[in-house]
Amino acid sequence: MNQPHRIAVIPGDGIGQEVMPEGLRVLRAAAERHGIALQLTEIPWASCDWYLQTGQMMPDDWKAQLAGMDALYFGAVGWPATVPDHVSLWGSLLKFRREFDQYVNLRPVRLFDGVPCPLAGRRPGDIDFLVVRENTEGEYTNLGGVMFAGTERELVIQESVFSRHGTDRVLKHAFELAMQRPRRHLTVATKSNGIAISMPWWDTRAREMHARYPEVSVDFQHIDILSARFVLQPDRFDVVVASNLFGDILSDLGPACTGTIGLAPSANLNPDRRFPSLFEPVHGSAPDIFGRQIANPVAMIWSGALMLDFLGHRAAHDDIVRAIEQVLATGPRTPDLGGSASTSEMGEAIAQRVGMGA
Ligand code: ATP
Ligand code: MG
């Protein structure tokens, strides 16, 4: 075996604590089958329990403790009954994203057999694409202000920031991903007909990057019609790249088109590998179902597959995704999918398939 991958395991709050054991169960099965050495370090902080004991979400040296890790495997954070969301979120997850320069937010969107699709007539295979969101700049800034507040002349300005460095690096990552997929197609989300300065510039950056990836076919779509096509023609998409705001919207709309929120995984990547990347389900801590062992573990498990892929183990990733596919099709399934299985029954079934070489 090679040097072990150092992974920080951060269950967090609510159902994060229930789906994490299933994620680890499947990771261990895949690691064993593929001879991958993992060094897992469980982290009790970045949780509201920790906050209630210590008055902070994380210890002061959190960055030093995590900086040597290869990846962070993260459950969910937030327990609004005792800790306001802005405290829990800004005190943990958003710090990771920013301090570890996780500039790519990646969300695979796929429709599986056995999962009811909210879009009429869609079959598995019709929906299988990646949303790549710029995760550090763009429309989400604190630049601007309110003038003449409280008067008839009240005026609000909110700036966007697009740097060449920040834009090129996310575009590059999206082209690289498109190159690895059979269709090699990239859709660039834009709004150059309405946002007259930044978006035409974004399109120019994308065209320039395209010159380095001539094998990839590219189309530019305005965000409004692009959103409509997610619903009406999802089979058109392969890889979609978007600015922070547009990507935020698309990366919720995409998974919404494929059934339950319990399936959708995500990766917050620092592709330069200067800092650890973070892998987490799209869903939150779901206080409404916590403690009943009914949370769907697939989003957590699939996020683990993305982590193995990022660490260089594509075959292990593919095994896990195949196992997910099979268990979604045949059961056992959790109640959000119309079944009656518990979180761990579903996790065990997936782990077993991975162990058998799904
Ligand atoms: P966030 O914490 O990201 O702001 P949220 O608190 O708005 O999200 P979630 O915690 O994701 O929302 O929960 C939204 C709804 O989806 C809840 O009704 C929750 O029970 C359900 N849900 C979330 N995750 C799962 C899961 N893994 N399995 C089944 N149901 C889930
Ligand atoms: Mg929440």
Image (cartoon, helix red, strand yellow):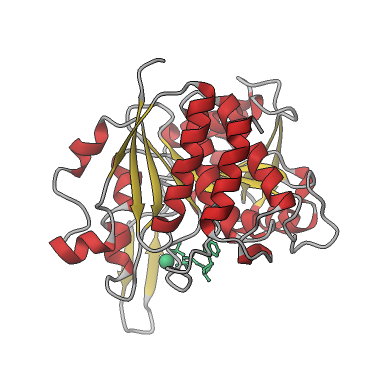
Return the residue nearer the eye: 231 or 337.
337
Image quarter for ligand 2? bottom left
The C terminus sits in image quarter: top right
Q: Quadrant of residue 333?
A: bottom right
Q: Is residue 176 visible?
A: no
Above or below, comparing residue 308 to residue 11 in the picture: above
Nearest to the observer: residue 105 or residue 11: 11
Quadrant showing the N terminus: top left
The answer to whether residue 78 shows anywhere in this view is: yes
Question: Looking at the image, how many numbered discs can be counted on the residues?
Answer: 0
Q: Residue furthest right?
A: 121
* Residue for point 20% across, 52% down: 58
Relative to 45, is 356 above or below?
Answer: above
Left or right: 87 as drawn, with respect to 132: left
Give the image location of residue 87, x and y in percent. Answer: 26, 64
- In the image, residue 303 sits, relative to residue 143, either above or below, namely above
Relative to 113, residue 2 above or below: above
Rendered location of residue 124, percent (x, y): 78, 48
Quadrant of residue 64 within the rendered picture: top left
Q: Residue furthest top?
A: 2
- Front position in the image: 49 or 141: 49
At which x and y percent is residue 217?
73, 29
Residue at image position (43%, 57%) is 18
Point 54% across, 49% down: residue: 347
Residue 101 on image: x %, y % = 35, 38
